[in-house]
Image (spheres, grey):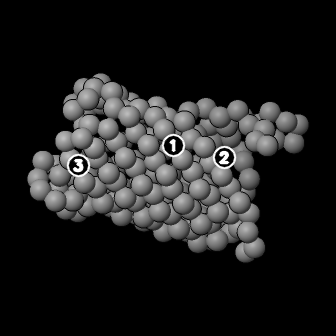
């Protein structure tokens, strides 16, 4: 049982140059039991995200292809760990009635073990002001945990360059031999 109160996970994207943006992310958690670490910053990272092939997301034909790579920062006031790194490929296709994103990533986790990730995201119609979104993913952390997860939520397109995502995630973690 998770004995932590979790704040919202925050992901900030900032456009640096055409087709490139910086990403900063993290989550504040607070331990609710006596043996917890108090308030911690977890899951922090700094990344660059760039479009490698313009496609349907940019109003052109065919799939859009992007990459995201960067550093996993050490957790603050949490379990010990160092920095890690991640590189990902994202292939997306948009149609009038839905958008589909396929994500694959490889990482060296903060605990210095390998990690592989595969995810699928499906959005509702892009021209809706508020559109539904669903995600499933599989992650294999070679340090001993396999996670499958499902997410449902909504994306509110406030204006052209500002969207707010709200979602609920149901993870299932299983420990395995290292």
The residue wearing badge 3 is 94
Q: Position of residue 90 (x, y in %)?
A: 34, 59
Q: Is residue 17 visible?
A: no
- The answer for how far apart the CA atoms under marks 1 and 2 are is 26 Å
Image depth: mark 1 or mark 2 in front: 1
Image position of 108 (left or right of 51): right
Q: Residue 151 carries which label?
A: 1
Q: What element carries label 3?
A: strand
Which of the image's four quarters has the N terminus?
A: top right
Q: Which of 4 and 81 is in front in this view?
A: 4
- The answer for how far apart the CA atoms under marks 3 and 1 are is 20 Å
Which of the image's four quarters has the C terminus?
A: bottom right
Along the polypeptide, which appears first: circle 3 or circle 2?
A: 2
> Which residue occupies 71% across, 45% down?
77
- The answer for how far apart the CA atoms under marks 3 and 2 are is 38 Å
Q: Nearer the viewer, residue 63 or 96?
A: 96
Q: What element carries label 1?
A: strand
Along the polypeptide, which appears first: circle 1 or circle 2?
A: 2
Q: Position of residue 44 (x, y in %)?
A: 55, 48
Find residue 37 and report its image quarter: top right
Q: Which of 31 and 147 is in front in this view?
A: 147
The residue wearing badge 2 is 76
Q: Which mark is residue 77?
A: none
Q: Which residue lies furthest to the bottom in this view?
A: 178
């Amino acid at each position: 049982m998770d004995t932590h109160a979790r704040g919202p996970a925050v992901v900030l994207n900032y456009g640096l140059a055409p087709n490139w943006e910086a990403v900063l992310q993290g989550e504040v958690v607070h331990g609710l039991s006596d043996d917890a670490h108090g308030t911690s910053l977890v899951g922090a990272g700094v990344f660059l995200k760039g479009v490698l092939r313009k496609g349907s997301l940019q109003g052109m034909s065919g799939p859009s292809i992007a990459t995201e790579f960067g550093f996993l920062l050490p957790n603050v006031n949490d379990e010990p760990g160092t920095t890690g790194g991640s590189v990902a490929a994202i292939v997306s296709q948009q149609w009038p009635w839905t958008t589909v994103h396929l994500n694959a990533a490889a990482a060296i986790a903060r605990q210095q073990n390998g990690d592989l990730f595969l995810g699928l995201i499906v959005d509702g119609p892009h021209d809706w002001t508020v559109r539904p979104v669903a995600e499933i993913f599989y992650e294999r952390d070679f340090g001993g945990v396999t996670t499958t997860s499902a997410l449902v939520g909504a994306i509110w397109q406030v204006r052209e360059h500002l969207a707010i995502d709200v979602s609920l995630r149901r993870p299932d973690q299983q420990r395995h031999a290292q």
